[in-house]
Amino acid sequence: MFASAITTAVQTVGITLLFERMPLSYYAFGAVLQFGLTAGIRLSYRFFLALAESRSANKNGLRIMIVGAGAAGQMLLKDIQTGTKQNGRVYCMIDDNPNKWGLDVDGVEVIGGRDMILQGVKKYQIDNIYIALPSASGINRKEILSICNETGCKVKVLPGMYQLVNGEVTVSNLKNVSITDLLGRDPVETDMTEVFRFLAGKTILVTGGGGSIGSELCRQIASHHSKQLIIFDVYENNAYEIQMELKDKHPELNLVTLIGSVRDSRKLNSVFAEYHPEIVFHAAAHKHVPLMEDSPCEAIKNNAIGTYKTAYAALMYGCKRFVLISTDKAVSPTNIMGASKRICEMIVQTFDAKVKAGKTADLPLLFTHSGKASAENGYRPIPADASTEFVAVRFGNVLGSNGSVIPRFKKQIEAGGPVTVTHPDIIRYFMTIPEAVSLVLQAGTKANGGEIFVLDMGSPVKIDTLARNLIRLSGLQPDVDIKIEYTGLRPGEKLYEEKLMSEEGLKTTSNKLIHIGCPIAFDHDQFLKDLIELMRVAYTNTDAIRDLVAKMVPTYHPKKEQINSSER
């Protein structure tokens, strides 16, 4: 338009000066004609270029099916049709709403419901299936994905309602199907309003704050106006990573990042003496089952003794709540890691019992260094009115956490296989990191002391099934394109995990998916005596630790071949 305006002005002046004055209609018609022809050339070029690209894509590109003909599906279709970078064409759409069957959506037919997926894939020779069902329930999503599994197509999904609300439904927003899409249940939802009201204005300490659960706890806490957040971790790289992330996202946050071990009571005491945290989330632990089978004393030192020292420091310095992160592996454990976490639960229950009975003086100091309980080492008498509430939170395997089996499967698939599964019948309960963290925060808010909170994680899932689904949803065939190998159960591993011991009962809470396990009675005083001996034996670094653990945890039943193997 600018170029045409300049040309028209030059033409008008030139013709008037060099020849003669012409009628105004002459100049107006010339300007419109010039603009139309110039723009027409440019638009024609773009039109034929787009047409050529479209024909090329239709001939050589991906053949796509979209599941979901609602707002999200239509936005996705439009992005594929208009995007010059999309190498593919949508041949059909699927929707469970019968009112949409047979309709034409921008030239693409809705051929039917989910029962037409297999037929549509075969008829149109589909390569990729895009699932645009952001509001679908977990059960519906799993059923649709199970059908898609049978097609051999590569499947991608739109993550959620956020993209739809913000108008971000594009091919670039699609993600590969994750195992969370196959769990077959909706995420556990808790009323976080009360949780964050409880956290606001408080000083909060997260031990193991650089780990999978610890770092997510820090993210959630940082976004809800805590007075101060203290990250405590022995691994500096993890601590640094979460520190930088929170500083970038929450520059106003009063953040303290400290390096130290929960085994070091003097370091813990100095942290509590300086910052006086009101709430402690104790996530620091060794969690890798086979590694702890090879180093059982380290599991006891870090998990059991570390928990005791952290809890003792919390009690000395008047902490209001102490929340232990436990695991379903603490139930009838067959491995030393699970047994050490059961001891952690028993420590929490013992502390709670002593506080409620007003007998905190019965709690011994556990020293691993020379010296006395002096002010120089950060020790001081436990207040007579100590009222710290101790609680444990127990959940299953966390998807995406450090050491999770899912990232390993994905790497093996990317490398062309084989995918290694320990046993064809092994099953596990799974939950997402946000679910786990919401439960932990809920426990920190509603705890009265002594509870073991347990999440109803739905039905357990076979690891073999997860591996095969991941392979299929990558557009490959198990045992054809990617081989599956069974390597046998690892030391300390069992086929299934329980959420509760048979002796424990369940109490319901306001959230029907969150329960409280009734504590199993045991002799707290004898337990404390055994704990002192347990620490002594742990620091001798001998396998005699297993016998003492078995005495303290009656439900611990290690397999004989594991014990014999470790002795050899």
Image (tube, rainbow, N blue to C red):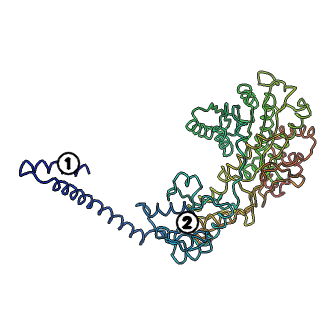
Q: Give the side of residue 68 with respect to residue 305, left or right.
A: left
Which residue is nearer to you in this view: 256 or 488?
256
**Residue that mark 1 sits on:** 6
Q: CA distance from mark 1 to mark 2?
A: 49 Å
* Position in image of residue 42 (x %, y %): 28, 59
Residue 255, numbered label? none
Residue drawn at x 55%, y 75% as measured from the top left:
120
Instruction: State which quadrant residue 238 falls in.
Output: top right
Q: Residue furthest top?
A: 375
Which residue is nearer to you in this view: 101 or 474?
101
Task: Pick whichever of labels 1 and 2 is earlier in the sequence.
Answer: 1
* Position in image of residue 319 (x %, y %): 78, 31
Instruction: Name which residue type carries label 1.
Output: Ile
Instruction: State which quadrant residue 424 falls in.
Output: bottom right
Q: Give the side of residue 359 with respect to residue 89, left or right.
A: right
**Residue that mark 2 sits on:** 69
* Position in image of residue 274 (x %, y %): 71, 25
Which residue is nearer to you in this view: 79 or 283?
79
Instruction: Name which residue type carries label 2.
Output: Ala
370 vs 244: above or below: above
User: Mark 1 falls on what kind of element?
Assistant: helix
